[in-house]
Image (cartoon, rainbow, N blue to C red):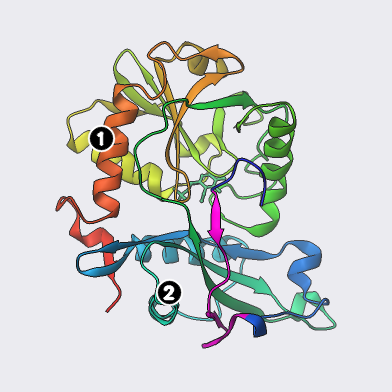
Amino acid sequence: MMKGSAPTVSNEQKFIWLDGELVDWADANVHITTHALHYGIGFFEGIRSHATPQGPALFRLGDHLRRLEQSAAVYGMTLPFGPDVLADACCQVVSANGLGDCYLRPLVFLGEGANPLAAPLRCAVMASVHGPLVGAPKTGGAKAQISAFQRYSANAMPPAAKASGQYLNSWIGQTTALQAGYDEAIFLNETGFVADGWANNVFAVARGELLTPPQWSGGLPGITRDTVLRLAAEDGLTVAERPLVRSDLYLAEEVFLTGTATGVKAVASVDGRRMTAGAPGPVTTRVTELLNAALTGRSDAHPEWLEYVS
Ligand code: PMP
């Protein structure tokens, strides 16, 4: 795990769901000839589960599994298991491991075989437990750097896919930002518009409006992004999907990042230019409250977003 990513408290659990059944953590291994290791051919999701008074609840499970299916589909591949089986696998991993607050990782990957083009897709679902996923916004805020590494163009790799190999682009930008003393990389697309962060989407507040780049800018269609757009609009904020260039971020009153593992992360500065409202600003703080209430079932605005583990 890279420095600066979500703090892992305990990664090891009792069981992992692998190719249709729960297996002991220690037995969930693959052979070195597994093609996904060589070529990065795989698709994955990150899903949050929270302990609620009604038991563990998975946030927007159906939407995450739909994105997984679409990630494979744009590469012309079909998942080895349908959404009902995968939804059940996610619930099994939470309950068999006795978890409440955790992060779930469904991973579909290209297995072994002499010919990679004919190798089977395999599938695992694993859980990890992090530090508090839901909490008050940090006072300091992150130092973001506009990465010198641009997001791949839509004609190189499909931005809508959460595909393993595509993360080399995130990796090089984020590790370079960390080495330079920043906390977060923000990627521009090939025409200079803001795409997204290494594992999160980007929001800016300007003249009181909450802005985020449109999907064509090349960012992943984040489920937290969609959640924040909807909750903020329902709360009466003016929200808009608008192309942003780097100076829009320099001049913004507030900037924050969103993602399943990140939640809402306030940005204090971009390339050393400090946000005028400070970090976290009032909109960042309000959006954090709205998102946390939705994730933990404290708000009854969208009961359809929570899938309870029975
Ligand atoms: N962009 C990238 C590159 C990501 O990896 C993620 C994390 N999945 C996001 C944005 C945020 O997406 P989500 O809110 O669905 O986690």
Residue 244 seen in this snapshot: no
Q: Residue drawn at (66%, 58%), measured in percent from left and top?
A: 164
Query: Is 270 included in the stretch rendered in magenta?
Result: no
Circle 1 sits in a helix, a strand or a loop, which is it? helix
Instruction: Report the Cα–Cα distance between label 2 and label 1.
Output: 29 Å
User: Against 16, is 67 above or below?
Assistant: above
Instruction: Name the residue at the front extreme.
Output: 9
The x, y position of residue 121, in whole percent, is 65, 78
* Quadrant location of the C terminus in the rendered image: bottom left
Q: Residue drawn at (47%, 52%), measured in percent from left and top?
A: 131
Q: How many marks?
A: 2
Q: Which residue is mark 2?
A: 90
The x, y position of residue 204, in whole percent, is 42, 24
The x, y position of residue 253, in whole percent, is 39, 15
What residue type is disc 1 on? Ala
Circle 2 sits in a helix, a strand or a loop, which is it? helix
Toward the viewer: 18 or 27?
27
User: Against 79, is 210 above or below?
Assistant: above
- Is residue 239 left or right of 144 when viewed as pictured? left
The x, y position of residue 74, in whole percent, is 58, 60
Residue 232: assigned label: 1
